[in-house]
Image (tube, rainbow, N blue to C red):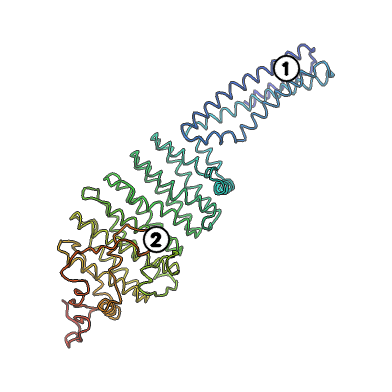
């Protein structure tokens, strides 16, 4: 194309070196005007039609994106200037010297050739951009860090102004509707990369800042909707890639110590746990969602992004418990709930125990409400994380028990659940958090009471290892406080799981004990139990040890 343009220019230059008469000059100029105007009108009409069809297929906002492109503006400018020179030449023929006329003719010819070259490049570019890959590449080029920030600020100030990622989201949704897996995969990859770039550029965006609002919108609202649409279209791999995209964004947020971004990503993903259908073919997606959320919460804790980890851990436990409560006996099974209880939540406490962070012990009432909301006394992020772990463990365990009572089937492995509770108790003891350790141990005793006193055969395999692993001081103090009413470890278990948002309103909801009309109350049951603390038996708490006890203990 460049060679043709060069040859045309040389030919025009040679021709214009010979001065034509006025009639010939007018004929040349008028022909150039008609041809250029006609081609311009026809080609641009077709281009506009093509752009409109692409816009209606993928996103109405694409038309604006095309019209603001620099190639479009250059092409229109060259054509307009070329036609203007031709018209100018028609007016000055006969009024200028031969030398000036030669310049006008040469300029008109060169500009005409240039306009056609420019038009060819523009049309070729438009044709490329009408494909899904071309459209996505064009959108990616537009989403620069500077433009994303500017668009986010405009969107925050004016609700009518679209979010910087809205066009990309619309295109991804359209490719999913058409079952175009390759294009949707490319779109999700671009989505993850661009949102991560926005987080990296702005670091710790303040709450409710334009960037924070944009990240919340795309991660908490739009990305989960993309996944749900993929599930509805039975595109399992696309749904899983959507979760992987969330993981990519979450990793970028953790690297930037952005608590808010971590919260938005995990809230968006964890919210899917109880929103997705309970069909067997969807359980794979739910498992990926749970595992991605787990990994982000754990990584945040390991990198000391404690506020984000704390809020996310509590939200994850809440939605997982709500998911169990919604299940029926015929729904698909999922072992990820056991994974949360045996490995994930207890490991968060061990992560804190292994760090150099100083943690203050709170009263058990404070631990139960350890969330930084306007309704409770403020706590440190690390304290909030520990409180979140306890709340999630208790709520999720309560949901699993209630499910088993309702359906007669186990949804978790109770041996593993008991091991998870015991592991968390070990970490709390290591950190010398006596009040929380007592609350934790008291809760395991309450779970054992439910398993033993229920008229149904539930929680088979649950063994309170804590009886044998807790220190004597913690064990005796816990039992004595339960007996005299200074400690009530039943609260979190007795609340109906999946109720009021536990972050905004901790320990709020409808309280319904799991055991209705039991033969013995929890306190009465405690009074009949022998306890062995670190290998030493002390019978019922309050009774003096026997000589046999002091000689090493008796297993019962």
Q: Residue at x 65, y 32 (%)?
A: 74
Q: Which mark is residue 427?
A: none
Which residue matches tag 2?
Answer: 298
Q: Earlier in the sequence, mark 2 or mark 1?
A: 1
Q: State whether residue 407 is above or below residue 16.
A: below
Q: Residue at x 27, y 54 (%)?
A: 325
Q: Which mark is residue 29?
A: 1
| Image-quadrant location for residue 34 | top right
Mark count: 2
Q: State whether residue 198 is above or below residue 235.
A: below
Residue 164 lies, in percent from the top left, at 53, 44
Residue 546 lies, in percent from the top left, at 17, 87
Q: Secondary structure beneath disc 2?
A: helix
Q: Secondary structure beneath disc 1?
A: helix
Residue 257 lies, in percent from the top left, at 49, 60
Quadrant of the rendering where the C terminus is positioned: bottom left
Front one among 59 and 468: 59
Asked whether, in this view, residue 284 is left or right of residue 115, the answer is: left
Front one among 41 and 129: 41
How many angstroms separate mark 2 from mark 1 (CA)?
A: 73 Å
Quadrant of the rendering where the N terminus is positioned: top right
Residue 82 lies, in percent from the top left, at 70, 24
| Image-quadrant location for residue 306 | bottom left
Q: Residues within 10 Å of mark 2 (few under 14, many from 20)?
A: many
| Image-quadrant location for residue 356 | bottom left
Q: State whether residue 19 is above or below residue 452.
A: above
Q: Residue at x 53, y 50 (%)?
A: 198
In the rendered image, the residue lying farthest to the bottom is 547
Q: Residues within 10 Å of mark 1 (few under 14, many from 20)?
A: many
Asked whether, in this view, residue 33 is left or right of residue 216, the answer is: right
Asked whether, in this view, residue 157 is left or right of residue 324, the answer is: right
């Amino acid at each position: 194309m460049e060679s043709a343009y060069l040859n045309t220019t040389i030919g025009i230059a040679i021709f214009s070196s010979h001065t034509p008469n006025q009639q010939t000059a007018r004929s040349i100029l008028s022909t150039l005007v008609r041809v250029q105007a006609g081609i311009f009108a026809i080609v641009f009409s077709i281009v506009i039609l093509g752009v409109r069809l692409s816009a209606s297929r993928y996103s109405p906002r694409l038309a604006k994106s095309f019209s603001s492109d620099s190639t479009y503006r250059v092409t229109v400018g060259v054509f307009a200037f070329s036609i203007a020179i031709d018209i100018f030449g028609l007016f000055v023929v006969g009024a200028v010297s031969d030398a000036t006329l030669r310049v006008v003719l040469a300029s008109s010819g060169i500009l005409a050739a240039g306009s056609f070259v420019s038009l060819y490049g523009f049309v070729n570019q438009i044709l490329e951009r009408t494909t899904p890959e071309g459209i996505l590449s064009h959108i990616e080029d537009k989403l620069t860090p500077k433009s994303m920030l500017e668009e986010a600020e405009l969107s925050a100030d004016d609700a009518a102004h679209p979010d910087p990622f809205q066009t990309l989201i619309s295109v991804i949704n359209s490719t999913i509707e058409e079952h175009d897996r390759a294009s949707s995969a490319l779109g999700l990859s671009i989505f993850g990369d661009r949102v991560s770039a926005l987080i990296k550029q702005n670091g710790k965006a303040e709450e409710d800042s334009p960037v924070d609002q944009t990240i919340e919108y795309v991660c908490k609202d739009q990305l989960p909707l993309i996944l749900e649409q993929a599930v509805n279209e039975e595109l399992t791999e696309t749904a899983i890639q959507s979760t992987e995209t969330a993981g990519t964004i979450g990793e970028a947020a953790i690297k930037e110590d952005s608590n808010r971004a971590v919260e938005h990503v995990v809230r968006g993903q964890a919210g899917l746990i109880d929103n997705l259908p309970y069909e067997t073919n969807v359980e794979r997606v739910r498992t990926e969602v749970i595992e991605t959320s787990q990994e982000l919460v754990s990584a945040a804790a390991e990198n000391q992004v404690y506020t984000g980890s704390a809020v996310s851990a509590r939200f994850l436990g809440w939605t997982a418990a709500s998911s169990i409560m919604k299940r029926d006996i015929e729904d698909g099974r999922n072992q990820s709930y056991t994974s949360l209880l045996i490995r994930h939540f207890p490991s968060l406490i061990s992560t804190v125990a292994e760090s150099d962070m100083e943690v203050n012990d709170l009263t058990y009432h404070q631990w139960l409400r350890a969330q930084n909301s306007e309704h409770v006394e403020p706590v440190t992020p690390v304290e909030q994380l520990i409180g979140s772990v306890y709340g999630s463990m208790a709520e999720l365990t309560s949901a699993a028990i209630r499910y088993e009572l309702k359906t007669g089937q186990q949804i978790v492995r109770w041996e593993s659940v008991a091991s998870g509770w015991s592991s968390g108790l070990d970490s709390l003891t290591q950190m010398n958090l006596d009040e929380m350790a007592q609350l934790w141990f008291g809760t395991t005793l309450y779970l054992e009471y439910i398993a033993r006193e229920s008229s149904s055969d539930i929680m088979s395999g649950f063994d309170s290892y804590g009886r044998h692993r807790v220190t004597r001081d913690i064990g005796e103090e816990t039992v004595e406080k339960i007996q005299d009413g200074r400690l009530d470890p039943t609260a979190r278990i007795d609340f109906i799981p999946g109720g009021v948002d536990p972050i905004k309103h901790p320990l709020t909801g409808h309280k319904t004990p799991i055991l209705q009309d039991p033969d013995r109350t929890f306190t009465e049951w405690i009074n009949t139990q022998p306890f062995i603390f670190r290998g030493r038996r002390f019978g019922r708490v309050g009774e003096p040890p026997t000589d046999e006890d002091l000689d090493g203990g008796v297993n019962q």
